[in-house]
């Protein structure tokens, strides 16, 4: 299994990316890597080049660049070369910690959509604190600013496959993020998506779920449009960070008593922070394209980069993409009906 | 100033509602109340009836009822009678802790929209942990499942008035909740709303804000469609509750060391919880109707009910509604332009 790596994307690239590649390489003997980036810098970091090929380029896509224009104009950018290698069959999966919009554009326009999937979406694994499973998968987290009911319906299938094949959940519970739990909640798109999801024979659709219940394990697969998905993810992140900051401030302002209390609770508080750290579960996956396309966040260090490679490996071992493709072909009638309903 | 009170709405009605009325009545000599509900029950609770009138009804709207149908059919429901009193000029403001949808419907269809406001929206005051002010106001929190750009534009004005007149902020910073901070982010509605808000001479529009930054005081007024507003509010609530639960679990599982640490940090942790408790700032306000229409959450106790009456009093003292009406009339040209753009 060969992974094409954009070695230049991310705040700590190429250092932490290359270190993460070596960690994953040492752990899994069946992984090979092609790194795209500045050869001299990469070679300076590499301990040994076993199962690692470096392809030199000094062109890269910056964080602020307009994504579609960037991938079209910068044909030699590390990200574009990595995606092109996947398209041409030289690699099986794509990894980057760079410009999110450009990663999505590279996935959709270079690697390409799976036939029958109208709009690939971004899936993220998040933690739960209650219920049977310790994680759930949510999509779309913001790849698309607008969604039709048929897109949400297809996310139901993509998310279901991910939860089953990669996370190992049996008959995952699929929920639709909405304003309330009743079936007639939300705008026309969400009402129609509810009907489509509910009519599916394949999915274990449990109805609408509210943002308040996400971390309580309301569903194993949470389907949402990109706008609400992005809002939910960022509100969860922001609130968790705020709470941790408030704990710190409260402790510091409580003087010696607070410091002693904090010392005693140190392990507990760290455990809590770790439990909420969803980056440990890996990166965000662009589902609906012809190969695993995975981004990790820009500030990722070697350990998180290595975790993301493990996640990519799981997707490849489980043959997630062929399974999705096969399913879409077998059920093209059912999925076509959903498009006609638009 | 006279407030019409639905004494039967809420999990602890009429007990906590009536107690909250008395607390507010004792504190503010200029407040009078008309309570709608079961006379016998209310009289049993009342300490004294100074500046409190009770109008008997044993009809009420239940939590699960379909809102519009309920307010149309149950003409004698406590909520409908309270709203009708405001419509007829017998009271200046409306309060309920009952069925949210029915409160919105009563506000819009009985009390009525301000001329020029297309869609009244629900505004909530939330806490910040950084920046100049300790609170911000956000709307729409879910009164409308779908929004046009002109609705969001009008929320800019309504939120700006609320922040200035009720919260006392000078030239409040108005932001638009969106997928990213760049001006071209989001769907067509958000892009157009950005242009309308940015072109306004009245508003201090600071551009797009992300859900991650809300509690950091990214803006004093956050404008959003009802779907994303609802998602953000519920994700913030859910995450805060989850974190508090995790702290508790971590402490309990840390044994005697954890319990001692927790004891030392007790005041700090309580301070943190109180700081995030947005219900202390009062209830959610339906802005864009002809009188203050305020709901507090169903589980509100007397103190929160009393806080909400103080908030209503501030709106009445500041003459918020007449100020909004006057502004809308003076600027009907600018606001009409926004409607034509749809």
Image (cartoon, coloured by chain):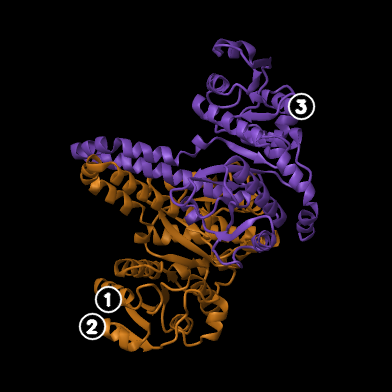
Chain colours: A purple, B orange
- The span from disc 1 to disc 3 (Cα, nearest Å) is 75 Å
Residue A172 or residue B152, whichever sits in front: A172
Same chain? Circles 3 and 2: no
Q: What whole-number distance in Å separates the C-alpha atoms at marks 3 and 2?
A: 83 Å
Q: Quadrant of the N terminus of chain B?
A: bottom left
Looking at the image, tell me whether mark 1 or mark 2 is earlier in sequence order: 1
The crowd level at tag 2 (other Cα within 10 Å; few <14, some 14-19, many 20+) is few
Q: Nearer the viewer, residue A4 or A240?
A: A4
State the image coordinates of residue B164 (x, y, percent, origin top left).
43, 58
Q: Chain of mark 3?
A: A
Tell me the residue that label 3 is attached to: A89
Instruction: Give x and y (percent) for residue A178.
Output: 57, 59
* Residue that badge 2 annotates: B48
Discs 3, 2 touching: Cβ within 8 Å: no
Measured in 3D between alpha carbons, the distance from the residue under mark 1 to the one under mark 2, in whole angstroms, is 8 Å
Q: Secondary structure at mark 1?
A: helix
- Label 1 crowding class (10 Å Cα cut-off): few <14, some 14-19, many 20+? many
Q: Position of residue B91 (x, y in %)?
A: 41, 81
Residue at 70% over, 44% down: A120
Mark 1 in CB contact with mark 2 (< 8 angstroms): yes
Residue at the far front in the pictured view = A170
């Amino acid at each position: 299994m060969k992974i094409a790596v954009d070695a230049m994307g991310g705040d700590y690239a190429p250092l932490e990316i290359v270190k993460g590649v070596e960690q994953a390489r040492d752990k899994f003997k069946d992984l090979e890597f092609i790194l795209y980036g500045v050869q001299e810098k990469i070679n300076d970091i590499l301990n040994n080049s076993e199962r690692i090929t470096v392809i030199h380029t000094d062109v890269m896509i910056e964080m602020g660049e307009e994504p579609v224009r960037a991938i079209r104009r910068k044909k030699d950018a590390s990200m574009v070369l990595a995606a092109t290698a996947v398209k041409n069959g030289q690699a099986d999966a794509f990894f980057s910690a760079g410009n999110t919009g450009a990663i999505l554009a590279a996935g959709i326009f270079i690697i390409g959509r799976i036939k029958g999937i109208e709009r690939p979406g971004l899936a993220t694994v998040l933690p739960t604190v209650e219920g049977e499973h310790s994680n759930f998968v949510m999509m779309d987290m913001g790849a698309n600013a607008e969604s039709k009911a048929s897109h949400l319906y297809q996310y139901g299938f993509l998310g279901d496959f991910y939860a089953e094949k990669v996370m190992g959940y049996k008959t995952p519970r699929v929920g639709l993020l909405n304003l309330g739990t009743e079936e007639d909640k939300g705008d026309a798109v969400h009402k129609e998506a509810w009907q489509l999801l509910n009519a599916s024979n394949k999915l274990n659709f449990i109805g609408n779920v509210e943002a308040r219940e996400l971390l309580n394990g309301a569903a194993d697969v949470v389907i949402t449009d990109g706008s609400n998905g992005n809002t939910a993810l960022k509100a969860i992140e922001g609130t968790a960070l705020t709470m941790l900051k408030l704990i710190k401030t409260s402790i510091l302002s409580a003087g010696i008593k607070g410091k002693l209390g904090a010392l005693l609770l140190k392990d507990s508080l760290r455990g809590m922070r770790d439990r909420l750290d969803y980056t440990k579960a890996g990166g965000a996956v662009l589902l609906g394209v012809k190969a695993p396309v995975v981004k990790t966040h820009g500030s990722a260090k070697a350990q998180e980069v290595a975790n993301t490679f493990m996640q990519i490996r799981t997707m490849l071992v489980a043959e997630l993409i062929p399974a999705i493709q096969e399913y879409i072909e077998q059920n093209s009638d059912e999925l076509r009906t959903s498009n006609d309903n638009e």
